[in-house]
Amino acid sequence: MPVAHDPAYRTLRRTHRQFGVKATSVAVGGFLLYVLLSSFAPTVMNRSVSGHLTLGLALGLGQFVLMGVIVWRYLVHHRTRVTPVVRSLRGLVRHQEAAVGRARTTAAPREGDLRRW
């Protein structure tokens, strides 16, 4: 049975895709919110938070924090949900390849092979 038909593989693809959609939505949403606030609410973005630090600058720096959190969640997702399934599927593929290799070595010689001897 090919790995693509394995239910674990299908679940892996679905969860990985769902995580990707969520992470991309959060990242794009954060950037879009920042750009829209900068464009349509400049008085809010120019409001001083502390000294020379404005709300716009703080939100701009917050984009780096947002990306760091997304990357951290991606790594946690991979470590907890993707890697264990991939390891089991990799073992399944190796087992199937070994079975195919054993079947080839024990198979009867083909007619063309007999003519060479």
Image (cartoon, grey):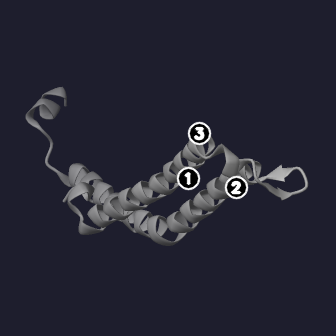
Residue 16 spot, x, y in % from top left: 40, 59
Whether residue 62 is visible to the viewer of this picture, yes or no, is yes
Badge nearest the viewer, 3 or 1:
3
Q: Nearer the viewer, residue 116 or 70?
A: 70
- Which secondary structure, mark 1? helix
Dot placed on the residue nearer the N-terminal end, 1 or 2: 1
Q: Which residue is mark 3?
A: 39
Residue 33 spot, x, y in % from top left: 54, 50
Residue 12 in the image: above or below residue 54: below
Q: Which mark is residue 62?
A: 2
Q: Amino acid at mark 2?
A: Gly
Q: CA distance from mark 1 to mark 2?
A: 9 Å
Dot placed on the residue nearer the N-terminal end, 3 or 2: 3
Q: Amino acid at mark 3?
A: Ser
Q: CA distance from mark 3 to mark 1?
A: 14 Å
In this rendering, position of residue 46 left or right of residue 37: right
Q: Which residue is mark 1?
A: 30
Q: Amino acid at mark 1?
A: Gly
Whether residue 95 is visible to the viewer of this picture, yes or no, is no
Could you tell me which residue is drawn at 63 percent across and 43 percent down?
A: 38
Q: Quadrant of the N terminus?
A: bottom left
